[in-house]
Image (tube, helix red, strand yellow):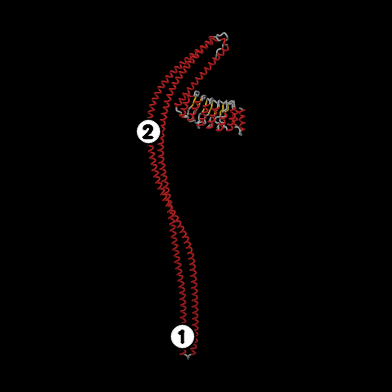
Amino acid sequence: MEEFRRSYSRLCRESGAEPQEAVLQQLHQLPRGRLDLATQSLTVETCRALGKLLPRETLCTELVLSDCMLSEEGATLLLRGLCANTVLRFLDLKGNNLRAAGAEALGKLLQQNKSIQSLTLEWNSLGTWDDAFATFCGGLAANGALQRLDLRNNQISHKGAEELALALKGNTTLQQLDLRWNNVGLLGGRALMNCLPSNRTLWRLDLAGNNIPGDVLRAVEQAMGHSQDRLTTFQENQARTHVLSKEVQHLREEKSKQGCGCLCPQFLDLMETIDKQREEMAKSSRASAARVGQLQEALNERHSIINALKAKLQMTEAALALSEQKAQDLGELLATAEQEQLSLSQRQAKELKLEQQEAAERESKLLRDLSAANEKNLLLQNQVDELERKFRCQQEQLFQTRQEMTSMSAELKMRAIQAEERLDMEKRRCRQSLEDSESLRIKEVEHMTRHLEESEKAMQERVQRLEAARLSLEEELSRVKAAALSERGQAEEELIKAKSQARLEEQQRLAHLEDKLRLLAQARDEAQGACLQQKQVVAEAQTRVSQLGLQVEGLRRRLEELQQELSLKDQERVAEVSRVRVELQEQNGRLQAELAAQEALREKAAALERQLKVMASDHREALLDRESENASLREKLRLREAEIARIRDEEAQRASFLQNAVLAYVQASPVRTLSPPK
């Protein structure tokens, strides 16, 4: 193994990969003739190196590669290398999940390799692909060395079992086959059972866990029992023939050593009698073999008839099972249709309920939106009304202020007119007073002049006195003039004061009025600005009202559209419900027709069951007859075998007598003493 280990390391390094330490350790510790790499995760490079080394390996007879997690490429390389190996006897590939490529590589291995006698393929997936497993079965049919094959847990179906049955018909060396825990089924079990009469070497076949009926398993076990009996008989006859051939060869060697001249006529006669007895035994064995062959042919004919009856029974059972399956399928279809109808109705009811709920929710939402829009519209309308009231109030206030301004302007005008009138009256009064005073003065002057004239006329004589009176009058006149002038000045001053006071009062009133006018103008401007703002607010409110009106109109149209859609959906739902009802009625009609057909099939099945019962009773009677005939034939065969055994015993006694005679003759021979045969 050291050379093998060095070669493995060299090949791994040549391929550019490091050798696996676990594999090197196992190669270092393994005993001679056995390579155990179980549970070692082998890489593709390791498999390539082993595939190159194993064809030249002459000491390894057992190779264990169980649970090595081989890839498809690695398994192909490894098995390709084992094709040229001539010393390997035992190969274990358990638990490597071999699939299509592995099955094809195993088929090529079985075709080319002539030394492997035991192959373990448990826990793989060879039967997953039918074509690859057919290749494997073709290699098994062509193999001439394999004696034990383990195919447990390989997902082999009934098709794979049929391919395997064809391979067993052509194989002449396989003795043990393990097919436990696969998916062979009834068809695969029958195919394997039918191939067993053609195979004379297989004496062990395990089919547990394959869903195979008990009668097929019992038939396979009975066939395997016959094969084991045949094998034991063949081995015993072969051993006896070998022992007798050795004894005869020993006798011939001993006699040849004594020489041809020492042979006496008695020994020749004895040999002639032995030959005659052998010929008679051969004739009797041939006759008994012919008789046994005839009995076997008759038994095979009976078996063929029984098999035909069994085939008919199986066909009727299959037809009955098919009809029952059809009835069950129809029942399942009916149940599924009812369930589908129920689920469809429930689903439609749920959909209708959901649609109604959605429509109610949409309607409630739209109503809420409409109510909210109405409330908003009312609020806006209230705001608009309030703004209009405010606007009217402000207009009224503006009108009142305008009226107050007009009234104040009229009052100011009246006051100005009254002041002017008062001023005119004062002027007229002053003028009148002046005119009165002037008229009085003039009158007084006239009176005085008249008085003077009268006094001059009357009192010319009184010039002195009048002169004095004149002087007094002149003084008085000057005083009156001064008084008039003072009064006139006072009146003028009073007039000037009144005019100035009136002007001041008018100016004050005008200033006050101007202030009022300015305040009123400011108030008017503010009122106009407020009016403009209110107009803008009113315009915005009107635009918002128009927008809200448009939104309300859009919501109304949307509500109408939704109502139309709801009505259309209601119509569609009604149409869908009517259509579903029609379909359900049609399905009910079809189901009723299928039920009628099923009832007819049940009646046919009942008729077939009655026919089957009749055929089964006839078959049982025929089987009983055949069994009685078979029992009689077995009894005849047993008697014949007893007779053959008796003849064999007689012949054996004769042979022993002859042997004793020969031994006595040989012991009594004067030439030399022969040793007794073993």
* Residue 234, above or below 609: above
The quarter in which the C terminus is drawn is top right
Q: Position of residue 30 (x, y in %)?
A: 59, 27
Secondary-structure class at tag 1: helix
Q: Which mark is residue 121?
A: none
On the question of residue 625 being in view, the answer is yes
Nearest to the observer: residue 378 or residue 433: 378
- Disc 2 crowd rating (10 Å Cα; few below 14, some 14-19, many 20+) is few
Q: Position of residue 498 (x, y in %)?
A: 49, 75
Q: Which quadrant would residue 326 be assigned to in this image?
A: top left
| Distance from Cα at disc 2 to Cα at disc 1 | 170 Å
Report which quarter residue 145 is drawn in.
top right
Asked if one can make out residue 367 in the rendered structure from this viewpoint, the answer is no
User: Percent x, y for residue 318?
Assistant: 42, 30
Q: Residue at x 50, y 85 (%)?
A: 474
User: Disc 2 marks which amino acid?
Assistant: Ala
Taking the image as shown, residue 18 lies to the left or right of residue 577, namely right
Q: Which residue is mark 1?
A: 446
Query: Which of the marked residues, 2 or 1, is nearer the chain's N terminus?
Result: 1
Q: Residue at image x 49%, y 90%?
A: 463
Which residue carries the number 2 mark? 600
**Where residue 354 sits in the image (x, y, percent)?**
42, 45
Q: What residue appears at the point 42 percent right and 45 percent down from the top-left corner?
A: 355
Which of label 2 and label 1 is nearer to you?
2
Amino acid, disc 1:
Glu
